Image: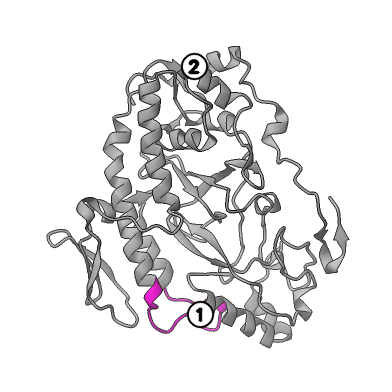
Amino acid sequence: MPGVTPDDAPLLADLMPWSVAPPRLGRGWPTAPDTASLKARWRALLKAEGPDREALFAPTRSRTLASAVPQLPGRSGGTGRLARESGPCPEPVRVLAAPFDEQWLLPDHRLIDSARPELWRVADDHQVFVVEQSVTPEPSGPLLLASPVLPLTPPHGPRIGRVRPLYRRPGGQEPNLAPGLPEHLAERLGTDPVDPLDVLAWFLVAARPGPRGIEVPLTTDPETWDHGVGLGRRTLWLMRRNGDRPKLPGGRRPYVRAPFPSRPLELRYDPGEEALLIDEGRISPVPAEAWDFHVGGVRALQEWFARRTEPAEPGTLEAVRPTTWPQPWTSELLELITVLALLAELRPSQAALTIQRPITPAMLREAGVLPVPDTTRRPASVLDHHEEGPEGQFTLL
């Protein structure tokens, strides 16, 4: 990114001070690409008794059938010990199981080793979770992801870093930004008040790896700011979408040209035909940029496919899955191809973003924006109601 030296850029950790490690399940079976499998797994767990139930559950040091834990904030999962559980399946919720891979989760605290309740308390329709990708000497793919649903630590594949919610309170209240940053940007840019979503949009395109962590150059040049925010808003829309379906450049959309087998095993790419080959099935057009899109050093499409087709150990709850390829997975794959292609299309413009008239950390310190108070690095107190504790006991925290 021309025009900026390493000392010019503040750290993301200072600009979005509150961060949390992503939830870690400790077992794979509470997540799945479809809800029917999760409900069938829950029934299989409750049908088993004694040692059989324990083996299916896959206990860890953090969670066993005897664990007594509070309810997940905002969820209705039980709090009694799983050893004697006989109730209905918790209603699955959408989560980001891995980069660019939304799946479903059984939101039951007893199933999750490290649930990070502070994230669940602020997860709503207004929230955007910023997900850091691992910073490597030669990073590939986006450094930051934006997700409308709660991100999890992937069970395998590329690891993710810290999760930084855009808002510290439910309802889109209290942006998780350095106090005074939006006002300082507005003053230096000579613009109206800066929306937190515009600040996030800038972060998505300007973030870069640095020796001390992820850096985010800032600017006082209105034209540079508007251009970067425009690119970032497009990036943010592609990562969230909110039910809208994007199209490839020229209005094209990938289609299934030859049907998939009932249980596909292999994924290949034909660059000459711009086709994704799933055994004898075929999808086209698939731009090469979508096929080559990497996150954390791995190809996003291959990882997405592998998580739906890799064999599961017989007799485990992970083995309870669709016997044939479900049609909704095809629709999700077609949309993912489009999203990756459009994100790749934005890369040259992002790489060419030149930071004119940068705002340095020294300037932010002089303006009183930095250093941030220690309280901004901790979760806000959002508890104004009872949360159910272990064994159904209510506590007010």
Q: Which mark is residue 188?
A: 2
Give the amino acid at mark 1: Ala
Tell me: 207 left or right of 84: left
* Res 367 seen here: yes
Position above or below: 259 against 196: below
Which segment is the magenta one?
A: 309-328
Tell me: 175 left or right of 395: left
Position above or below: 211 against 74: above
Q: Looking at the image, which residue is at 78% across and 49% down?
A: 383
Closer to viewer: mark 2 or mark 1? 2
- The quadrant in which the N terminus is found is top left
Mark 1 surroundings: few (<14), some (14-19) or many (≥20) residues within 10 A: some
Position above or below: 272 against 15: below
Kindly indicate the quadrant of the structure image that contains residue 253.
Answer: bottom left
Mark 2 surroundings: few (<14), some (14-19) or many (≥20) residues within 10 A: few
Tell me: 282 left or right of 294: left
How is the model colour-coded?
Answer: one colour
Real-space Cα separation, disc 2 to disc 1, in angstroms: 57 Å
Work out whether residue 83 or residue 10 is closer to the camera in this orientation and state it: 10
**Residue 66, image x, y percentages:** 78, 72
Work out whether residue 188 or residue 393 is closer to the camera in this orientation and state it: 188
* 310 falls in the magenta region: yes
Q: Looking at the image, which residue is at 51% across and 22% down?
A: 185
Q: Looking at the image, which residue is at 53% across and 78% down?
A: 37
* Res 296 seen here: no
Residue that lies at the very extreme toward the front in this rendered image: 192
Residue behind mark 1: 319
What secondary structure do most residues of the magenta stretch adopt? loop
- The mark that comes first in sequence, 2 or 1, is 2
Give the amino acid at mark 2: Arg
* Label 1 residue SS: helix
